[in-house]
Amino acid sequence: MRGAVIHAPGDVRFETVDDPKIEKPTDAIIRTVVTCVCGSDLWPYRGLEPIGDPHPMGHEYVGVVEEVGSEVTAVRPGQFVVGSFATSDNTCANCRNGWQSHCLNRVFMGTCQAEYVRIPNAQGTLVATDEHPPEEMLPGLLAVSDVMGTGWYAALAAEVRPGGTAVVVGDGAVGLCGVIAAKEMGAERVIAMSRHEPRQRLAREFGATDIIDERGEEGVALVKEMTGGIGADSVLECVGTSQSMRQALHAARPGGNVGFVGVPHEVAVDGEELFHSHVALRGGPAPVRGYLPDLIDRVLAGHIDPGKVFDLTLPLAEVAEGYKAMDERRAIKTLLKP
Amino acid sequence: MRGAVIHAPGDVRFETVDDPKIEKPTDAIIRTVVTCVCGSDLWPYRGLEPIGDPHPMGHEYVGVVEEVGSEVTAVRPGQFVVGSFATSDNTCANCRNGWQSHCLNRVFMGTCQAEYVRIPNAQGTLVATDEHPPEEMLPGLLAVSDVMGTGWYAALAAEVRPGGTAVVVGDGAVGLCGVIAAKEMGAERVIAMSRHEPRQRLAREFGATDIIDERGEEGVALVKEMTGGIGADSVLECVGTSQSMRQALHAARPGGNVGFVGVPHEVAVDGEELFHSHVALRGGPAPVRGYLPDLIDRVLAGHIDPGKVFDLTLPLAEVAEGYKAMDERRAIKTLLKP
């Protein structure tokens, strides 16, 4: 089969790779229906994370089951399935506690920008839809497998409540999905921090009531102005830099909550400052598996449309251009069709 | 009047100081019934925090109202009152959100090891009991004004739930009160980390089901052993060092909560490690005022007895010995009687 392989920073190639095979009785093989490029894929692409030997890329997917291992009974060949970027057996102590992305048998996906994909822990990871969804639902369902699920978790970790105020730091696909999540959870005011016009427009479409295009302490000052001087109840940190984390912590009110889902790169939180702020902090890879049934329903019912974060669609064979467009900020997120 | 004044590390004196006076219409003056020495008073006493000019000490108190300012109507002269170490108007946005220790008009107490004390924000800060409590209730009510309220907050911040497992890091008065709180909130298992026999005994009396006397990663390994390999649902961090914070974070399970109430001294939390742990972190000075009515009731009903943390009682005139005994760990906590 063919799939994307990263060789060096800026060098992603579409080439022939080994066909995936059932390796364990808990595996499944799916034929990829659509996949995409993630903001986090840009870290190695930009040379900000080591690459090592050339290796496949991609962790977002929806597909049709081709084959299942002997212990997989929850899905069967021919079904359309959505899964999470972090596979989980859905039976271990962490899964039972609702932390499937911390499954004791977790395997992170990493080969999904390809025509076929092996899914470890398929029994606990994959959720089948009743029917094959129509073409126009595919982007939304694909978003659910990572960015929408991650935005959802950010809002939960930030304890968004009906009637509350939520701030979203970061206007990438995850931040934009965070706006959807905050709105769905009943936030009365959803403030998106974004300085890019097309993303501001999408944020408003997704439910943002206010846009702040100032950054850092200037942006924080505006949040305070909008919140009676004290800050927001909930802040979703969707970037992962030291600056964005500071901005998020400062934008939250005393007793408020920051949910952080941008993978932190050289972020240190000062214990004394956190103490005196009274702000709570929770982050991590989102336990998307737990939200899949609900989020799939919301997409299929037409209630949310996170697929709009894909503003560029390319054949999988043009995956290199997909990375390039996101790197150069010509695209928010690239959808790839095998 | 007379009161304690710190002059230099190790040098606390009982001397004549100015009588407190009503300075604002929101003030009250109380005659101190009992007061005490706090673990945090030891930081300047040990030379670990700057002292500057000689100044009064003490932030824990119960007393009888002597005089009130013109805007104070909630308490009247002659009433027995309990207050918090952080005064609050109980009407500002932060107070209404339940974060009285972040009141926009907050004044931290600091002159309570004295015969009389001025209480700012008296209207929102002081809670009167129906009657003057009997002598034997005084230590418990005094504990409520800080250490018991702080232990209570630690358990709330750590989201202790009925049936859950709570670990308490630190066996000072706050940690021991944290054991009481975790038990009251229904934790099925309360694991106290302590290596001092008298404190272990008190922890058991307060409801600890298990004692771990190993520290650091060895202690963490034992917590994991007791919790099916994953860690505790809730961890109360009641020390404030970099080592104790690491121990607390590592003892919590994925998705668990750490409540930290030891004032952090040179503690930095690694963002990436916190991210991958899925642990939530909330700390700060406890909003004790909000808990006062409930905790006073629990003490007066004989339901909890946090006064047992006082294992040394001295006349206020011997305050210097009170500090010395705690510094040398001959006492857990010193109660002082004017």
Image (cartoon, coloured by chain):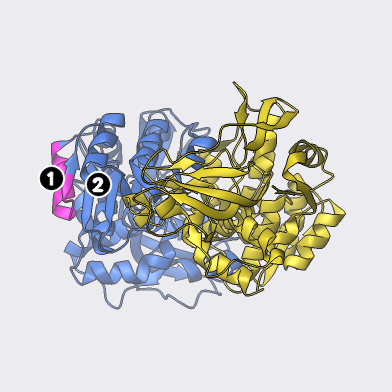
Chain colours: A yellow, B blue
List x then y, in percent, for residue A302.
67, 73
**Predominant SS along the magenta part:** helix
List x then y, in percent, for residue B275.
51, 42
Decide if residue B119 is in sight here: no
- Work out whether B282 lies above or below B267: below
Farthest residue to the top: give it: A53
**Res B156 quadrant in image:** bottom left
- Which residue is at 27% across, 31% downward? B215
List x then y, in percent, for residue A139.
69, 59
Earlier along the polypeptide chain: callout 1 or callout 2? 1
Answer left or right for A169 relative to B274. right
Q: Amino acid at mark 2?
A: Thr
Tag shown at residue B2: none
- Work out whether B144 lies above or below A3: below
- Work out whether A285 lies above or below B67: above
Determine which residue is flagged by label 2.
B227
Q: Nearer the viewer, residue A173 or B43?
A: A173
Farthest residue to the right: give it: A197
Which secondary structure lies at badge 1? helix
Q: Are marks 1 and 2 in contact (CB under 8 Å)?
A: no
Q: Amino acid at mark 1?
A: Arg
Chain of the residue under label 2:
B
In magenta, the rendered stretch is B197-210
- Which residue is at 60% across, 67% downward? B93
Q: Nearer the viewer, residue A123 or B66?
A: A123
For the residues labelled 1 and 2, the Cα–Cα distance comes to 23 Å
Q: Does B193 lie within the magenta span?
A: no
List x then y, in percent, for residue A106.
42, 43
**Res A23 quadrant in image:** top left
Determine which residue is flagged by label 1.
B201
